Amino acid sequence: MNTSLLRQTWNLIETTNALELLEIGEAELIQQLVKRLDAQIPLADCDRTSINNYLRSKMGLIKDTAESRLVSA
C-alpha cells in the first residue's frame, strides 16, 4: 500500500462519525470503509486486499481514536 492511499485511508477514518466507527461491527466497518475509499479512488484488487488487512490490524487504534474524539467533543 502506498503512502498516498494510507493517508487517504486515515483521512476517511478521521472524517467518519466517531459513533459510527464505534457502533458498527469490525467486519461491516472494514467493508464500509473500503467501499467509501473505492468510491473516492478506484482501487485495484491488490490495494483492496491490502487495505482490508491493514484496517483489520489497526481496528484497536481506529476504535481508540474514535473514543478519544467523543471524549474531547
Image (cartoon, rainbow, N blue to C red):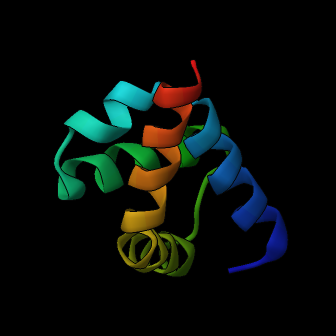
In the rendered view of the protein, which quadrant contains the N terminus?
bottom right
Q: Disc count in the image?
A: 0
Q: Please, which residue is most extreme toward the top here?
A: 73
* Residue ID at (40%, 79%): 57
Horizontal and vertical percent for residue 48?
48, 69
Q: Which residue is found at the position 44% from the left and 30% from the top?
A: 18
The image shows residue 73 at horizontal and vertical percentages of: 57, 18
Q: Position of residue 9 (x, y in %)?
A: 63, 55
- Residue at x 47% of width, y 24% of height: 17
Relative horizontal placement of residue 4, taking residue 54 as reference (left or right): right
Residue most extreme to the front: 71
Q: Determine the residue positioned at 34% across, 55% down.
A: 30
Estimate the x, y position of residue 28 in percent, counting from the top left. 21, 48
The picture quadrant where one finds residue 44 is bottom right
* Nearer-the-camera pick, 65 or 27: 65
Left or right for 67, reference 44: left
- Of the pair 33 and 49, the residue shown nearer to us: 33
| Relative to 16, 9 lies left or right | right
Q: Is residue 51 above or below residue 13?
A: below
In which quadrant of the rendered view does residue 56 lie?
A: bottom left
